[in-house]
Image: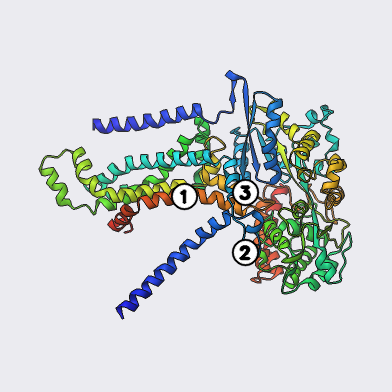
C-alpha cells in the first residue's frame, strides 16, 4: 500500500515537472526550427533543426542588451542587500520603535502601480539627464525591490535563535561582529533567496526599461519584444532570443538551488 | 550615529557619482569634440525596417561622422515610448517611425519638423513621386510632416488551386456577397472558407472591419462628430462580418490577426484572406511559403462603394526636439529616396523593395518582374482609395480605417472588445454596438468643443 502510494506520488511529481517544463522545452525546440516550420499548422515535430535563429539574434547585438541587464540586475541586487540586511536587522533582532509602522511604510511604497508614477519618474530623469542611463535604471530597480527584500529579510531574522545573539552580546561582541560573524552565517540561505528574487525581478522588468531607455541602457526584455513583427513571422527567432534570455536566471537558480531550498524553508514564504 | 551618517553620505555619494559617470559615458547623441553625430532611430520591427538597418552602412559611408543607431520596438511599445519622448520634449530620438494615424495629429501639435519646403526644394528627391493618397494622409494644414517608408492597402488573397477544385472563379472587383457565397462553398473540414481578423484592437479587428462598415455605408462619425456606431449601416456591416466568420471563418477568430491568418493561409488551412497587401510579398516567397505561385490577388471586396481598401504607411519623421535635425532629415530623405530603392533591389533582392510609397517603384523593370504577382494590384488599389472620404458620406478627418483623433485608440480598442464578444457569441452585435455608441459619442463630443 505504502509502495503504491509512493509510486503514485513519484509519478504525479514527474507529471507536474513535465507539465511545467513543457513550455520551456517547446520554446527551445521552436528556436531550432525555421520560421516556416515554427508557424506550421499543425506543428511539425520532424522539422530540420539548426542554430540559424541564434545567429540572427546575435547579429542583432543581443550581447550588449544582456550586459545591460546584468549590470542593472546585479548592481541593484547588491545595493538592495546592502540596505536590506541592516534595515531588517533593526526591525527584528534589535527592533526600533514603531516597527509595524515602519514595515507598513516600506510595503506602502509598492501600493502605487508603476504606470501611475512613470510620468514623474520620466521627467525627473529627464531633468537629471539620466534617461537611457543604466545606473539610473539600476537605482530604480533597487528602490522597487527594497521593500520586498526588507520584509523577506525580517522574516529570516525572526528565525534566528535569539539565544545565539544574546550569547554573542554577553561575550562582548560589537554590533558589526554580531551581525557579520554570528547572524549573517545563519542567514546565508535567506540572503540567497532574497538575492535571487531581486535578481529575477530586475532581470524581467519590462515597463520601466521600455520607457526610460533607448539605446545605450536598453535591457533584454524590451529587446525580446522587438522581435514581434506585425507583418511577418517571428516565432522561431523570438524563441531563440527568449531561450538565451532565460538562461542566466536558470543558471542562477541552479547554482543557488541548495541555499534556496533552505532559505525558502526558513520562513520566506510565511 | 556618526557611523550611520557616514554610511548614508557614502551611499548617496556613490549613487550620484555613478549617475554622473554613466551619464558622461551614456547615450549622448552628439560628440562635438570629434564633430561626429549619432542619430538614434526608433522603429517597428517590420522586415523593411530590418533591411534599412542592414543597409545603413551605405549612408554612414557617404556621410562621414554620422552614425545611425536603430532601436527596434514592438508596435505598442514604440507608440508609448515615442509619444512620451516627443510629447515631453526629451529629445532622445532623432528619427522616429510613425504610423499614418499619428502623423497629422503630431504634426498639428507641433511635435514634428515640417518637411514641406525641404522636400520641394530638393528636385532630385522628387516628392511628387510619392503616392498622392499617402501624402494626403501624412499632411495637416497643407504641411507634410513625414515621408512614407512603405505603404500598404488591403486586398483579398485567395488560393487558386482551392478555387479551381471547387469550380469557382474570382472577379477582379468582387462584392462581399460574392466572397461570402464562395467562402461557404470552400468551407470544409480540411480548411475554412476565409480568414478575417477577430483579435480585439483598433489596429487588429477594426482595420478590416472598418472598411467593411464603410462599404456598407457606415462610418464612425458623421460630419458633425455625431457617433454612428449603432446606426443601421454600421450594424449591418458588423453583422455581416460576424455572420461570415460564423458561417465560413477560421477557428477561434478572436485569437487571430495578421500573423495568425498568414500562417493559416500558408499552411493551407484557409482558402481566402482579406488583409494587408504587403502579405502578398511574404506569400510569394518560395523560401518560406508553401503557397507561392498558387495565390490570386484582387481588390478589397465592396458593397455600396467602388473601392474599399484601407491605407496605411509607416513613415519617417524628425521630432522637433531632435538635436541633430539636419543630419536626421538627410537620413530620412536617403531612406525614402529612389536611390535607396535601387540599393535594396541590387543588394537584398527586388521583392524586398519597400512597396506602396513611390510611383516610380512600379516602373523599375526588375521590380516589375520579381513582384509581378502583386505589384500591379498594390499600385492600383493604393491609387484608388480615398482617405478623405472612404465611405458614402463626407467625414471631418483624413483616414480610412481609423479616425485621426487622440481618443480613437481607446474608443477603437473598447468597441473592438465588444465586437469580439459578439464574434465569440457572448453578446449580440446590436447590444455590443449600442454600448459602443456611448463610448464613441463621448470622444465625439470632445471634438465639438
Where does residue B283 sit, x and y in percent of width and height?
75, 55
Q: Nearer the viewer, mark 3 or mark 2?
A: 2
Q: Chain of mark 3?
A: B
**Are callouts 1 and 2 both on one chain?**
yes
Label 1 sits on residue: A247
The x and y percentages for residue A187 are: 26, 49
Residue ranking furthest to the bottom: A1
Q: Is residue B149 above or below residue A243?
A: above
Q: Is residue A134 visible?
A: yes
Q: Position of residue B71 (x, y in %)?
A: 61, 39
**As drawn, is A229 to the left or to the right of B125?**
left
Q: Could you tell me residue B159's position as x and y percent?
A: 80, 63
Q: Are marks 1 and 3 in contact (CB under 8 Å)?
A: no
Q: CA distance from mark 3 to mark 2?
A: 28 Å
Q: State the image quarter where residue A38 is shown.
A: bottom right
**Mark 2 crowd level (few <14, some 14–19, many ≥20, 10 Å Cα):** few
**Relative to residue A176, is residue A16 depicted above or below?**
below
Q: According to the image, label 2 marks what residue?
A: A43
Q: Residues within 10 Å of mark 3 (few under 14, many from 20)?
A: few
Measure the C-alpha gap from mark 1 to mark 3: 27 Å
Kindly identify which chain the residue marked by label 1 belongs to.
A
The residue beneath circle 3 is B76
Amino acid at each position: 500500500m505504502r509502495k503504491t502510494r509512493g509510486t503514485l506520488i513519484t509519478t504525479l511529481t514527474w507529471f507536474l515537472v513535465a507539465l511545467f517544463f513543457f513550455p520551456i522545452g517547446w520554446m527551445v525546440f521552436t528556436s531550432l526550427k525555421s520560421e516556416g516550420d515554427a508557424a506550421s499548422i499543425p506543428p511539425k515535430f520532424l522539422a530540420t533543426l539548426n542554430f540559424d535563429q541564434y545567429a540572427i539574434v546575435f547579429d542583432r547585438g543581443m550581447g550588449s542588451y544582456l550586459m545591460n541587464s546584468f549590470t542593472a540586475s546585479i548592481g541593484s541586487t547588491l545595493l538592495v542587500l546592502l540596505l536590506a540586511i541592516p534595515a531588517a536587522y533593526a526591525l527584528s533582532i534589535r527592533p526600533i520603535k514603531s516597527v509595524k509602522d515602519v514595515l507598513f511604510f516600506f510595503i506602502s511604497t509598492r501600493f502605487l502601480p508603476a504606470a501611475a508614477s512613470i510620468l514623474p519618474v520620466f521627467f525627473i530623469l529627464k531633468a537629471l539627464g539620466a534617461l537611457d542611463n543604466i545606473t539610473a535604471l539600476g537605482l530604480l530597480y533597487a528602490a522597487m525591490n527594497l521593500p520586498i527584500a526588507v520584509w523577506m529579510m525580517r522574516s529570516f531574522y525572526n528565525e534566528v535563535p535569539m539565544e545565539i545573539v544574546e550569547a554573542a552580546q554577553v561575550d562582548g561582541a560589537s554590533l558589526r561582529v554580531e551581525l557579520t560573524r554570528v547572524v549573517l552565517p545563519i542567514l546565508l540561505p535567506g540572503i540567497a533567496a532574497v538575492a535571487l528574487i531581486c535578481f529575477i525581478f530586475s532581470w524581467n522588468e519590462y515597463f520601466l526599461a521600455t520607457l526610460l531607455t533607448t539605446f545605450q541602457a536598453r535591457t533584454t526584455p524590451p529587446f525580446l519584444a522587438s522581435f514581434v513583427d506585425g507583418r511577418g513571422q517571428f516565432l522561431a527567432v523570438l524563441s531563440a532570443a527568449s531561450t538565451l534570455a532565460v538562461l542566466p536566471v536558470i543558471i542562477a537558480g541552479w547554482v543557488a538551488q541548495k541555499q534556496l531550498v533552505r532559505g525558502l524553508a526558513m520562513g520566506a514564504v510565511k | 550615529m556618526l557611523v550611520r551618517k557616514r554610511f548614508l553620505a557614502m551611499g548617496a555619494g556613490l549613487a550620484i557619482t555613478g549617475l554622473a559617470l554613466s551619464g558622461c559615458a551614456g547615450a549622448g547623441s552628439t560628440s562635438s569634440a570629434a564633430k561626429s553625430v549619432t542619430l538614434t532611430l526608433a522603429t517597428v520591427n517590420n522586415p523593411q525596417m530590418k533591411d534599412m538597418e542592414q543597409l545603413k552602412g551605405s549612408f554612414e559611408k557617404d556621410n562621414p561622422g554620422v552614425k545611425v543607431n536603430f532601436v527596434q520596438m514592438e508596435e505598442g511599445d514604440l507608440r508609448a515610448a515615442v509619444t512620451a519622448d516627443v510629447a515631453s520634449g526629451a529629445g532622445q530620438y532623432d528619427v522616429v517611425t510613425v504610423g499614418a494615424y499619428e502623423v497629422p495629429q503630431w504634426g498639428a501639435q507641433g511635435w514634428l519638423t515640417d518637411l514641406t519646403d525641404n522636400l520641394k526644394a530638393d528636385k532630385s528627391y522628387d516628392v511628387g513621386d510619392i503616392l498622392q493618397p499617402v501624402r494626403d494622409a501624412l499632411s495637416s494644414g497643407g504641411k507634410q510632416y513625414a515621408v512614407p517608408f512603405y505603404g500598404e492597402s488591403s486586398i483579398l488573397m485567395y488560393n487558386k488551386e482551392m478555387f479551381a477544385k471547387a469550380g469557382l472563379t474570382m472577379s477582379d472587383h468582387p462584392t462581399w456577397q460574392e466572397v461570402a457565397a464562395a467562402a461557404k462553398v470552400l468551407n470544409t473540414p480540411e480548411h475554412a472558407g476565409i480568414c478575417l481578423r477577430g483579435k480585439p484592437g483598433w489596429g487588429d479587428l477594426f482595420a478590416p472591419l472598418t472598411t467593411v462598415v464603410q462599404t456598407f455605408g457606415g462610418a464612425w462619425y458623421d460630419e458633425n462628430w455625431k457617433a454612428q456606431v449603432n446606426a443601421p449601416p454600421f450594424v449591418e456591416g458588423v453583422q455581416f462580418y460576424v455572420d461570415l466568420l460564423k458561417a465560413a471563418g477560421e477557428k477561434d477568430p478572436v485569437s487571430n490577426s495578421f500573423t495568425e491568418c498568414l500562417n493559416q493561409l500558408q499552411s493551407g488551412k484557409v482558402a481566402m484572406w482579406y488583409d494587408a497587401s504587403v502579405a502578398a510579398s511574404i506569400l510569394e516567397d518560395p523560401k518560406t511559403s508553401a503557397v507561392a505561385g498558387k495565390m490570386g490577388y484582387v481588390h478589397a471586396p465592396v458593397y455600396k462603394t467602388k473601392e474599399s481598401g484601407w491605407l496605411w504607411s509607416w513613415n519617417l519623421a524628425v521630432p522637433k526636439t531632435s538635436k541633430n535635425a539636419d543630419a536626421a532629415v538627410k537620413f530620412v530623405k536617403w531612406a525614402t529616396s529612389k536611390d535607396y530603392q535601387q540599393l535594396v533591389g541590387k543588394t537584398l533582392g527586388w521583392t524586398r523593395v519597400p512597396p506602396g510609397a513611390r510611383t516610380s517603384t512600379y516602373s523599375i523593370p526588375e521590380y516589375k518582374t520579381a513582384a509581378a504577382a502583386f505589384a500591379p494590384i498594390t499600385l492600383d488599389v493604393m491609387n484608388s482609395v480615398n482617405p478623405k472620404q472612404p465611405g458614402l458620406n463626407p467625414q471631418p478627418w483624413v483616414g480610412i480605417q481609423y479616425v485621426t483623433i487622440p481618443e480613437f485608440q481607446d474608443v477603437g480598442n473598447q468597441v473592438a472588445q465588444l465586437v469580439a464578444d459578439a464574434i465569440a457569441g457572448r453578446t449580440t452585435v446590436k447590444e455590443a454596438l449600442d454600448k459602443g455608441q456611448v463610448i464613441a459619442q463621448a470622444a465625439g463630443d470632445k471634438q465639438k468643443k
